[in-house]
Structure formats: structure tokens, C-alpha cells
Image: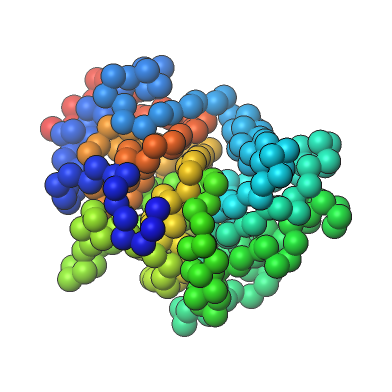
Amino acid sequence: MTRGDQSDYKLGELTDTVRPRDLLEWCRVPVEALTAHPSRKIPLRIVSDSAAMGAVMARELASLVEERNAQGLGTRAIVPCGPSSWYAPWTEIVNERRISLARLTVFHMDECLDAQGRPLPASHPYNFRTFMERHFYGGIPADQNVPESQRFWLLPSTMERVQQAIDEAPADITLGGWGQDGHVAYNQARRHPFQRPSLEELAVSTIRIQENNLDTIVALAQRTFGAAYQFVPPMSVTLGMRECLAAKKVRLFSDTGSWKQTALRVALFAEPTPEYPITLLQGHPDALLTATRETARHPIADHPEWELF
């Protein structure tokens, strides 16, 4: 998909926010009914737990690389830092099958920044490059591994180079997760009172530096720092929705449970809305969500006796 090309998307009219009464109905759907629900707008795969999800995620990329290697083709992949459960099976599969990564080009999806938009210290738990060098590349022999020249790290200093490289051809696959507000990469819901993007603007958003939303900071603080939000990176640099959705396949995964349950229901049932960027996947020709059972369930579905209005 070229810059500004929205031919694969049926964006429809802008829906600013999800209506609470609609949300209530979506959250009431039992987990057992989700995958075959007649109103579901994106394919959904439910797995038992984090280990099962990590194995599926690792196989997605490893099998694609293996298949394209057999055809004499390279593979271009947009890769996230997380979910973390896929790194061990990824290393195991690549090493056991002796899959060559020499033709794999990796575009790293995003990176966290400090309050002045600078890279974090190397040992910071939210320094994605440090984590990926250790867990994605670290366990694979040098003669099999992705060449350094084909690893595109996203930083303020590399934005133009990454943009040029990723625009050369669509990625073969986008792997990733989704956030509590349905963000893909760091494409968060924009809540600025004077700058609220339309759905069309969100769909063609590109690489940028931005402040992180307050709820994103709270979510990461709870996950990593015992709710010490003071240590969460306040800024990030991210691929845009245009880059993520231009891939031939989009595969998003979550094993984070309660933080992601409502965003999943919105992704499955809502009309596309900039309030939840993940809803843009509804227009992609080959998108698939994978969630653990805990992430796919919802407390409202578990309590039909609740009266919320």
C-alpha cells in the first residue's frame, strides 16, 4: 500500500467514541461464543494460555521465513518487543530447523523515549533494543542470524532511514500486540482536545515521536514497576498505522488478560473508530487476532446479573 492509499479500507463515517450501551452488549458475549459470533468483524483465535500463544506466534514468523527461503525469496517483517512469551519458542524453532535468517529484514515496531525524546539507558526495562538483542537475536548462531544491516531499529535519529527502507516494499507480515486502548505499535488513541485525528488520518499515520497517553503509563507502571508511574517512559517513537497495515499479513497477539479484554471486544464488534486504533484491522484482507482464554473472557460476561445502567 503506497502512502495515502486507502483502497483496501472501508473507513466509513467517523465514529468518535464507542457508545457505552453497545460496549455493554459486546462485553456480555460469553468467551465460548466469540470465535463464531455472527457479528464478529475480525477473525479471532483463542488459545489456552501464554505458552500456547507464544508457540503460535513464533511459528507464524518462523514458518513464513522458511517458506519464503524455499522459494528463494527474502522476508520483510515488522516485529514488536513483546508479547514476551514467543522469544524462547522462536529461538528453539529457528535453531532446531536450522532456519537461515540471512534473507530476513526486520523493522522494529517502536521504542520508548525519555521526557526529552531521547533513548533510554541500555539497562532500562523498557529499552526495547536491549531486550530484542538479548531475546530475539541473542540465542541464534551468527551464521544463521539476521545480518546487522537488515535490522532497522526505530529511534529519533533513524526515522528517515527507516521510513525510506520500509517504503521500498510492503512488509510480508506485521506481528504485534494491542494496548488497553487498542493501540497497535504505539499508535494510541489521540485524546488531545485540539488535535483529534479522523479515522482517515489515523489510517495514513506514519513514523513519529509522541507523548504516551496517561492510561498507557498507568498500564505499564502496574505491569512492571508496582504502579510507580514515575519510572515509565513518557514518550515513544513508533511506526504509523500506515506501515503496520501495509503488510500482507497482520497477526496480533495478547496474553495480558484484564488490561486487554475490553479492547478485544471493541476490535471484534465496533465500527472502525479512532478511539480504538485496532478497529482499522477490520479493513485488512488478511488480519487475525490471537488471545489467551483469559484475555478473551470478560468480567461483564461472567456476571450477567450486573446492572450497569
- The residue lying furthest to the bottom in this view is 116
Residue displayed at 44% across by 36% down: 286
Way the structure is coloured: rainbow
Res 190 quadrant in image: bottom left
Please determine whether, in this image, residue 232 is positioned above or below residue 288. Answer: below
Residue 113 visible, this angle: no
Q: Position of residue 268 (x, y in %)?
A: 33, 33
Q: Nearer the viewer, residue 162 or 237?
A: 162
* Apparent side of residue 193 relative to residue 253 in the rendered image (left or right): left
Residue displayed at 55% across by 66% down: 165
Residue displayed at 21% across by 69% down: 195
Q: Position of residue 116 (x, y in %)?
A: 47, 82
* Apparent side of residue 20 relative to residue 40 in the rendered image (left or right): left
- The residue lying furthest to the front in this view is 72
Q: Position of residue 2 (x, y in %)?
A: 38, 58
Please determine whether, in this image, residue 226 is positioned above or below residue 129. Answer: above
Quadrant (top left, top right, bottom left, bottom right) of the C terminus: top left
Res 125 quadrant in image: bottom right
